[in-house]
Image (spheres, rainbow, N blue to C red):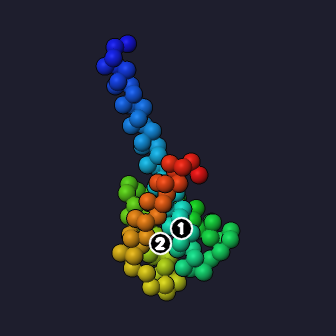
C-alpha cells in the first residue's frame, strides 16, 4: 500500500467518523428539542420522553429538519402554545451546539 493509499484511507475513515458524529448530534438535538417542546406542552416524565422519541422519529420522514419543525409547530399550535417557527429554529441552533458537545464528550 502506497503512502497515497494510506492517506486516502485515513481521509475516508475521518469522513465516516465525522458523518456518524453529525448524525448522532442531530438525533440528540431532536431529542432535546422534543423535551423542550414537551415542557411547553406541560408534559413530564414518561410522556415527555415518549414525545421526544416522536420528534426524533419525525426527522426520518424526509431529508432536512423541516419535518421536525412542522411537527413541533403543529403540536404547539394544537395546544394553543404561542411559539413561532423562528423561535423553534433558534432553539434548534442552541440545542445543536449542546448536542455536538455532548456527542464529542461521549455522553
Instruction: Return the residue nearer the eye: 5 or 37.
Output: 5
Residue at figure coordinates x 63%, y 66% from the top left: 49
Crowding near the residue tagged with mark 2, few <14, some 14–19, many ≥20 C-alpha atoms within 10 Å: many
Q: CA distance from mark 2 to mark 1?
A: 8 Å
Disc number placed over residue 74 in the picture, else none: none
Secondary element type, mark 2:
helix
Residue at figure coordinates x 49%, y 84% from the top left: 81
Q: Locate residue 101, reporting x and y percent.
A: 49, 54
Q: Locate residue 12, reporting x and y percent.
A: 38, 31
Q: Is residue 15 left or right of residue 33?
A: left
Residue at figure coordinates x 46%, y 43% from the top left: 20
In the picture of the structure, the residue carrying the numbered disc 1 is 34
Q: Locate residue 64, reporting x and y percent.
A: 37, 57
In this view, the residue farthest toward the left is: 4
Q: Locate residue 9, reporting x and y percent.
A: 38, 25
Secondary element type, mark 1:
helix
Instruction: Return the residue nearer the eye: 91 or 58.
Output: 91
Q: Is residue 79 above or below residue 90?
A: below
Q: Is residue 87 above or below residue 15?
A: below
Rendering quarter of residue 7: top left
User: Which quarter shows the N terminus?
Assistant: top left
On the question of residue 58 being in view, the answer is: no
In the picture of the structure, the residue carrying the numbered disc 2 is 72
In this view, the residue farthest toward the right is: 46
Q: Are marks 2 and 1 in contact (CB under 8 Å)?
A: yes
Amino acid at each position: 500500500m502506497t503512502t497515497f493509499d494510506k492517506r486516502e484511507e485515513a481521509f475516508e475513515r475521518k469522513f465516516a467518523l465525522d458523518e456518524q458524529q453529525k448524525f448522532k448530534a442531530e438525533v440528540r438535538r431532536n431529542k432535546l428539542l422534543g423535551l423542550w417542546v414537551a415542557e411547553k406542552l406541560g408534559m413530564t416524565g414518561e410522556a415527555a420522553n415518549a414525545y421526544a422519541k416522536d420528534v426524533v422519529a419525525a426527522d426520518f420522514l424526509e431529508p432536512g429538519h423541516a419535518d421536525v419543525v412542522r411537527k413541533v409547530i403543529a403540536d404547539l399550535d394544537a395546544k394553543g402554545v404561542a411559539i413561532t417557527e423562528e423561535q423553534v429554529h433558534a432553539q434548534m441552533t442552541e440545542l445543536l451546539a449542546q448536542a455536538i458537545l455532548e456527542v464529542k464528550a461521549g455522553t
